[in-house]
Image (cartoon, grey):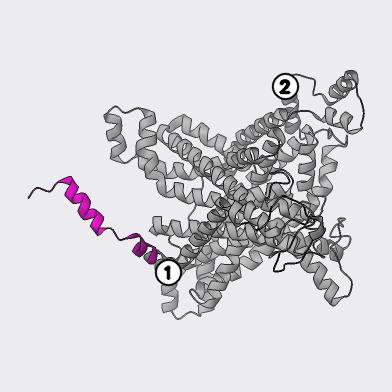
Amino acid sequence: MYRYILKRLLLMIPTLFGAAVLVFTLLRLIPGDTCELRLAGSGGYFDQSALDICRHEMGIDQPKLVQFWHFIWGIVRFDFGKSMWTGQPIVSEMAMRFQLSMEIAIVATIVAIVVAVPLGTISAVKQNTWIDYMVRAISIAGIAMPSFWLGILIILGLLIGTQYFLGTPWMPPITYTPIWVDPMKNLALIVWPAIATGYRYSAVATRMTRSAMLEVLREDYVRTARAKGLFEKLIIRRHALKNAMLPVITVIGIEFAFLIGGLVVTEQVFNLNGLGKLFVESVTNNDYSMTQALVMLVVMIFLFVNLLVDILYAWLDPRIRYR
Amino acid sequence: MAVTSAEIDSQLAAARPPLAKAALTLIRQQPLGAVSGLLVIVMILMAVFAQQIAPYDPIANHYEFMQLAPSAKFWLGTDQFGRDILSRIIWGARTALFIGFSCAFIGSFAGLVLGVTSAYFGGWFDLLFQRIMDVFLAFPLIIMGLAVVAIYGTGAQNVIIAITIPLIPRCARVVRSSALAIREIPYVDAARALGFGHMRIILRHMAPNCMAPFLIMLTTFLGQAILLEASLSYLGLGVQEPTPAWGLMLQGGAEEYAESAPWIAIFPGLAITLAVFAFNLFGDSLRDTLDPKLRSR
């Protein structure tokens, strides 16, 4: 097992390197650079020498290969440098936003699992009843609905609802408060975007739970358990659900990558200052160093989640042995 | 008794059920699929005949009709520039379907060819190719889209590029796994023994036999591409004003006016949801028909 994990970790290196090459090339293909944007942004005329000085400071006057080497060497030492746009260290720029985005992602995942597993199970057990049809309709709608539209609808609902019941419209807070400082204020902010992104997530997981449960419920060992006269509840919980969880976990892992993409849009709707918004800003500002660091972070999260899913697989199903 | 091929053809034609009967069977066996198919047809008609169907000009501003609630005159109300929302949704179908179909077709065709090629050659080529695909897969869709739009600028053509590139590896991977099985079937050996070139075997012999996964990916991509186009337009990175596009309609002040004129935010989103819903369901029933093993009971 440990050898397998080590092998997988080593296999991440070429993928990460490929991602580094890809993002580096993509960014250099974008016309203009951060110095042009910055000098043009301050308005009026700027001369070539100012541009040259700025470019020299940023290190983007060096040959591309040298720049690439600095970028890779930085990753190896976990030193991402400073943002080309704000001049602040990238790690500190990211830290606060990372907290916000990760919390939304985690709450969304929890929402998804808590909703999906019971709903999918009920839907499978009560196959072809009105409960089943309703769950299926809700989950199909969840896959079709854009998360930013759901976000807009949530804001709309909150405004109209609070106006009606409390008399004054209430909006979720915009500034982030860490959960250990003020849990209520923190959750008031996090819950809404988490629902907006989590709905699609839970819809996909519900569908997977349902179809996996349907398959497992037809297995011989479930029939044996029934023949033994076990309680139906026990059969479903102990015998069926445990075995149906494998594909569900895969789907949750795959969807986590979608979640990060979805956050880019959701943060825009709720006007949150998270990683997604930072990403959009740094791409539009041609902030090479920040964009590169963000992409590497996202790809790394994706790869680690995938590895985690595979390890979980072996843990849940002892028949699976990795070498 | 000698039977000519013409006779066989005519007998086969007689045995084939007429179109109406086939449609009836489809409705009975796949009621949801039939409904979604109908929705898809309605949307295609809307896109093609937008000029004739739309009651008003989707682009012209009418400052005397700003933010009007839905009424007999404006069925779905008007937006903050006095443009009829129904007309913009009808014209938006053209944008959405044009981009959706282009992305889905180009993406899945490229994926088909690349996936089959990778499986056909196998060995180190396959290994290297799969690692490259891994890199693209680890890149979140929307981030790829953002980068491409930043490079080439906004506009329908670039949105298509931005959405298509990340779709290709997704299709290539699925097609590859079924092409790996096909490679072992004797007719591929036979084709090789006859001295056919690599290109011919890949395109004429193997690719057509990967049709089931290919068609499933194609229909899945349709929904995804429409959703992505809407997301990019919403972020201001897709098609630009005044082109009518569903995502764009939600961007331009839909939130600001959410309280006073909720219809501006509600109807375009509903259009996106219905479109994606229809294409997804259509894909599902197509999968059930093409691949009975996967039938979702």
Left or right of A159, for residue B216: left
Mark closer to the chain start, 2 or 1: 2
Percent x, y for residue A222? 44, 71
Q: Which secondary structure, mark 1?
A: loop
Task: Tell me residue B97's x, y (percent).
Answer: 57, 49
Labels 2 & 1 near each other (Cβ < 8 A): no
Image coordinates for residue B172, horizontal then vertical, percent:
50, 41
* Residue lying at the far left of the rendered structure: B1
Q: Magenta region: which residues? A: B1-24
> Which residue is pictured at 81% across the width and 63% down the height?
A187
Q: Residue B170: which quarter of the image?
A: top right
- Disc 1: CA contacts within 10 A as few (<14), some (14-19) or many (>=20): few
Magenta stretch holds residue A120:
no
The residue at 68%/54% (across/down) is B88
The relative height of residue A203 versus residue B223 in the rendered view (above or below) is below
Is residue A79 among what the camera can see? no
Could you tell me how far apart the alpha carbons at marks 2 and 1 are, in whole angstroms? Answer: 60 Å
The 10 Å Cα crowd at callout 2, few under 14, some 14 to 19, many 20 or more, is few
The chain containing the residue under callout 1 comes to A
Q: Amino acid at mark 2?
A: Lys
Of residues A112 and A217, the one drawn nearer to the viewer in this rendering: A112
Which residue corresponds to mark 2? A64
Q: Position of residue A224 (x, y in %)?
A: 41, 74
Q: Residue at x 83, y 35 (%)?
A: A83
| Residue, disc 1 | A218
Q: Which corner quadrant of the image does residue B237 belong to? A: top right
Q: Main secondary structure of the magenta part?
A: helix
**Disc assigned to residue A1:** none
